[in-house]
Amino acid sequence: LDVGGAETHLARVLPELSTEDYEIVMFVFSGGGALEESFRCAGIQILSPPYRRNRLARLAQCTVSLLTGIMQYKPSVMHFFLPEAYILGSIISLSRPGVVRIMSRRSLNKYQQRRAVLAKVERLTHRLLFGTLANSTAVSLELRGEGILQENIGVIYNGVFPHELSPRAEQLQLKASLSIEDKSIVLVCVANLIPYKGHRDIIDALAMLDATMNWHMICVGEDRGVLSGLTSQENRLGLNGKISGIGSSDAINCYLDIADVALLASNEEGFSNFILEAMAAGLPIVATRVGGNAEAIVDGNTGFLVPPRDPAALSTALANLILHDEMRLAMGEAGRRRVEQQFSHHQCVSHYRRLYENLLSKERIPLGELFQSESMPT
């Protein structure tokens, strides 16, 4: 339960569903994490087996623990998030006759290309499901390509809270702590340091900007083994002092408050929470045209969409926003309105409530039919 896309999404949604009408129990493969306390405070029970460093031992322990949990709680619905939990959980759930199984896919399926055997197993487990949820139309199309019928696929977009601006004094203090000039155009990217998140492309794009431009880059995200390489790249390109690496943080709003432009250079993406958070904060955003990004961003209206792995295009889009104050403000305001109208937290939670009410009813409606009124945002 460390900070990540799926984990943050559930930390926002589940506490609002944990009422007298539902008993929610989370089973996780490893306990702990920055978000665990928020679930427990909401009255959500968390089951996690003791951590085992050896992978096979851990899977064995998870199997025993999940079987025990199923016998104890006798769930009516089992909802699987992320591939490993889905594959193992859906098979173990066969021990509970009559349980309704659904899965949420929150990323593109490129990971299957790296794990051919597991990809085949995952597609076989689709047959055990009542339905599947996607977090974007792009993801739902890939699920159809894996053999799941359209009528069994629903789409629930991520939702975000309205943004509350921190006091000006706190913003100035944060800028000072990062050695950012008050007149600098501040760029921000929130993404864990994973190769497919495209941080190398960001650094190359920044190096292409005109040397006279006054900007500063903030990168927020946990290092997943690539930080040293990124630091070497920054030094080689002469960007020392222009980029602040924050690491993992639960104070994302503070960095959005001092930013002028948001960017995300992922090579693959299901549907990004960060994009919505940046738009809610009134920031224009430059992002790669992958996955559900084009469903959140209106190109040329709320920001710019550029091809993945194209630092030159990324640099051009950033330069446009750095140089044109009125464009930044207009795009940021358009993004804020779009989030309020189509990606609110309230809408997201109401969709989940409708989902679970349907799954717990005697006559369940296929997910494609249940959410057929939910079209791709315009």
Image: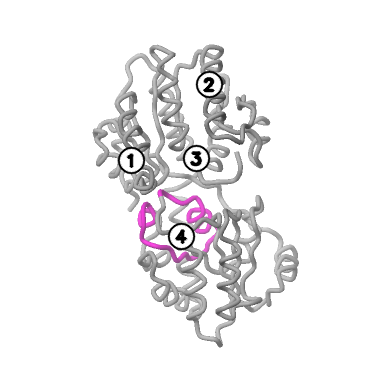
Q: Residue at x 61, y 74 (%)?
A: 216
Q: Secondary structure at mark 3?
A: helix
Q: Earlier in the sequence, mark 2 or mark 4?
A: 2
Q: Where residue 282 appears, x then y in whole percent?
A: 53, 62
Which of 339 and 246 lies nearest the eye of the viewer? 246
Residue 37 % position (x, y): 68, 35
Asked if residue 274 is among those painted magenta in the image, a careful observer would answer: yes
Q: Name the residue carrying label 4.
A: 335
Of the numbered discs in the image, which one, if any, rests on residue 66? 2
Residue 374 shows which numbered tag? 1
245 on left or right of 261 = right
Q: How far apart, in angstroms, are the residues tagged by discs 3 and 1?
A: 15 Å
Q: Which residues are magenta?
A: 270-295
Question: Badge 3 is on which residue?
Answer: 346
* Residue lying at 36% horizontally and 44% vertically, measured from the top left: 112
Category of crowding for the residue at label 3, using alpha-carbon neighbours closer than 10 angstroms: few (below 14), some (14–19), many (at least 20): some
Query: What is the secondary structure assignment of the residue under circle 1?
Result: loop
Tag 4 and tag 3, C-beta contact below 8 Å: no
Disc nearest the viewer among 2 and 3: 2
